[in-house]
Image (cartoon, rainbow, N blue to C red):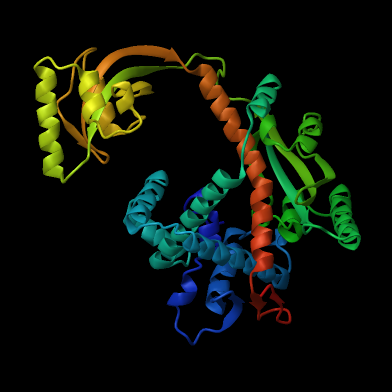
Amino acid sequence: MKTPIAPFLAVALLFGTASHAQQVEPLDSIVAVVDEDVILKSELDLALDNVLAQYAGREDQLPPREILQRQVLERLVLVHLQTARAADMGVRVGDGEIDNAIANIASQNNMTQDQLRQQLANDGMSYDDFRNSLRDELLSQRLRQRFAQSRISVSDAEVDAALASQSSEQYHLAHILVALPDGATPEQIALGQQKVDGIKALLDKGEMTFSAAAVRYSDSPNALEGGDLGWRSLDEIPAAFASPIRGLEPGQVVGPTRGPSGFQLLQLVEKRSGDGDQSAAQTVTQYRARHILIRRGDDAEAKALADTLRARIAGGADFAEVASENSDDVFSKDKGGELGWFTQDQFGPEFGAQVTTLQDGEVSAPFKTQAGWHILQREEARQTDVTDDNRRAQMRERIGQRKLEDEWNRFLREMRSEAYVDIRTGTPAAAAGD
């Protein structure tokens, strides 16, 4: 079996690039129209070939070719929709970011970039297609981040409850989803129930492995990865599954259970004790300081004013008074430039470099950041125990990720249902949305 370039780029390697359609000669045939974009046969063939290469030696886990083609094409449709939505929202990924990502991928795989190019060629993917697929993947990640920021919230009460019941056990899970549309009719619910019961019966009889059933039948975006969900702690598992999962042995399946996205089956692949001592104390250095910000006029004028103010302070003028009278930082000038307690990296590297080299009471020379010219007075430093803060932040992130999964999948289904999609291969053409 071919070794993928990097695990997190599975989608890129399996499905090529949504930009590929615009770069192929017009002699290529169209297999789908997605709003104002198209998916070409060459793009679909490339994606299919990459899936087959990833499953070399395990072809029996794949569905019949016509079903696999439909699954892959549907995934390509979602990739096109996500990149289009990201562009509409002004989300961009620059060439420099792509270069850095490729350098990191090569380093993680102990390759030079030339060796990476050769590996891609061996896998049947051009370097340009790889760059474009990586751009699409990063665009999708940023779209997901923006979605999370606008739609996902976690309350302090949820964090408190999760911390109170926290366990060190971790679970490697896989799932199968039989999706239901929002506002599903009784007939749609009955059909979904019938399908998931049929899948469960195949699993119970041993006629198919869970991974193979996920590839063939699951409606989840990770179906072609065998439904693999990776390692989860209990607080990252939906509440309907969290309790029964504790009593399972590796290989056992729980469900079907009805959730926000539809009917689900969940398999415990393996379990382990949590890593590290979560009770170990964690301390950071915090600094308290005042500053004066100058960003009026051009750069030379701002620098000249900063030099003048620094000379006044050196001559005995009170720093807080000078800040109140002259600082352009509207948030701190009324407090004499007071910034309160902060960590070294909180206000950027230039600021951090200054505050760490100063002694308590010492005033810096004027220095420049993206915000403008600064003068900084360090007041004091302290060691602070942030164990509880970090633990709460980690728990908040876990709960947020759990919530995001269902909401993101629902968002993808909404986006798909609202789009104009005309499939022109395999089955009669069908349009959704307008």
Q: Residue at x 84, y 43 (%)?
A: 255
Asked which quadrant contains residue 311, the reply is top left
Q: Nearer the viewer, residue 428 or 128?
A: 428
Q: Residue at x 54, y 71 (%)?
A: 46
Q: Residue at x 87, y 57 (%)?
A: 189
Q: Nearer the viewer, residue 189 or 59?
A: 189
| Quadrant of the rendering where the C terminus is positioned | bottom right
Residue 223 lies left or right of residue 143; in this view the side is right
Q: Nearer the viewer, residue 42 or 59?
A: 42
Q: Position of residue 61 (x, y in %)?
A: 71, 58
Asked if one can make out residue 167 in the rendered structure from this viewpoint, the answer is no
Residue 275 lies left or right of residue 196; in this view the side is left
Q: Residue at x 48, y 18 (%)?
A: 386
Q: Position of residue 291 (x, y in %)?
A: 26, 25
Q: Is residue 47 above or below residue 231?
A: below
Q: Is residue 311 above or below residue 131?
A: above
Residue 300 lies left or right of residue 125; in this view the side is left
Asked which quadrant contains residue 379, the reply is top left
Asked if one can make out residue 89 in the rendered structure from this viewpoint, the answer is yes
Q: Nearer the viewer, residue 120 or 149?
A: 149
